[in-house]
Image (cartoon, rainbow, N blue to C red):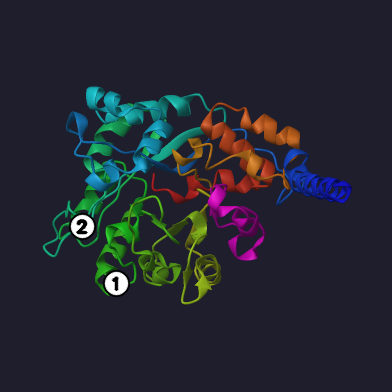
Amino acid sequence: MHLLKKYSSRLFACALLLVTLLLAPLLLGGSHPYQPREPLPAAAFIDLHCHTAGLGAGGSGCFVSAAMRHSFKLRHYLKAFGVTEKEILREGDAIVLTRLSERLAASRHVGRAVVLALDGVVDAHGELDRAQTEVYVPNEFLAAEVPKHANLLWGASINPYRPDALARLEWARAHGAVLVKWLPSVQHIDPADPRLIPFYKKMVSLGLPLLTHTGNERSFTQANDELCDPDRLRLPLSEGVTVIAAHAATTGKFAGERSFDRLARLMAGYPNLYADLSSLTQLNKLGYLGEVLRRPEFRHRLLYGTDYPLIEIHALVSPWYFPRQLSLRQRWTIGRIANPWDRDVALKQALGVPAEIWTRADTILAR
């Protein structure tokens, strides 16, 4: 019995030591950002990557598929938007934009945000395929609602396989669109398809950049990730399109190579290629922000974006996930910031995002 107690005591002591060693960095932390901290611009800047959604209320034309409607993800997204399904059905889908604008107006640092439309899958006849489209946010809805909010801009989304895709591009530009947004793996768009060359040429003539998802996609219930291989962007880049690789291709592998490394290699050959920082502080992408800030291929090629409303999901994005880079006081202070944009800016600034990145969107977006 004495030996058993002695053994148990030692085992408990070892376990306590192990827990202490594991928790000490989390509780105490360090102050070793990825790059030296730089001051923020004096003027407010643009978040070029924000989302909205709708259920079709108020005649918006938006819709969410049955699979997404019954997915746990939709509940989290609506909560992050600051709305309930009852509010949307009662007041219309525009309430999501109103809440977004109100939150943004309270930000000290971010003055405007680009809200993104999302076109759907098209069938063999070039018509919208509702059965395969999970989320649809039409350009017409944003073109009508965004001008009601002085702090919002909008990005069009046009599936290039639509027979009237070029006319839709012209319409979007004439109605104030500042970019075109694609999510190829969900919209079934192959950026490397030679049939899209006329679309790319029209984008160049209109001065519209392409913000396109790169890497794996996990926000939807299904996706063909192969279509988000960065290497498929060679065609639009060769045609002169300014391309912004959303999320800097920080997830997934293609041909046995990290998506991120494939994007980095493209940076050297195409000066019209950029990447945004949206989602790079998420729990599932820890470490990538440090890598993208340190890799020379990405120098002068990064833009500020948040992937709102995901920055408002605290289990997904938190300063507490960076115990090595931030001190306990920094994590506590940043975590207490109420405004989602100011909290995101404070976190990224503390981690070492350079001053030049915050304002680069001003030189890229069509205005």
Q: Going 39% across and 66% down the picture, which residue do you hit?
A: 240
Relative image position of residue 10 (x, y in whole percent): 85, 49
Q: Going 82% across and 50% down the picture, which residue do you hit?
A: 14
Q: Nearer the viewer, residue 318 or 192?
A: 318
Q: Going 65% across and 40% down the picture, which residue do you hit?
A: 320
Eye-nearest disc, 1 or 2: 1
**Residue 33 seen in the figure:** yes
Relative image position of residue 66 (x, y in whole percent): 22, 45
Q: Report the magenta residues as a range.
A: 280-303
The image shows residue 197, relative to residue 15, as above or below, that is below
Corner quadrant of residue 302: bottom right
Q: Is residue 293 magenta?
A: yes
For the C terminus, give its image quadrant: top left
Report how far apart the C-alphas of labels 1 and 2 lie in the structure. 15 Å
What element does badge 2 sit on? helix
The image shows residue 23, relative to residue 60, as above or below, that is below
Relative image position of residue 106 (x, y in whole percent): 50, 24
Q: Amino acid at mark 1?
A: Asp
Q: Nearer the viewer, residue 92 or 231?
A: 92
Q: Earlier in the sequence, mark 1 or mark 2?
A: 2
Residue under label 2, please give it. Answer: 165
Residue under label 1, please give it. Answer: 193
- Horizontally, is 325 left or right of 120 in the view? right
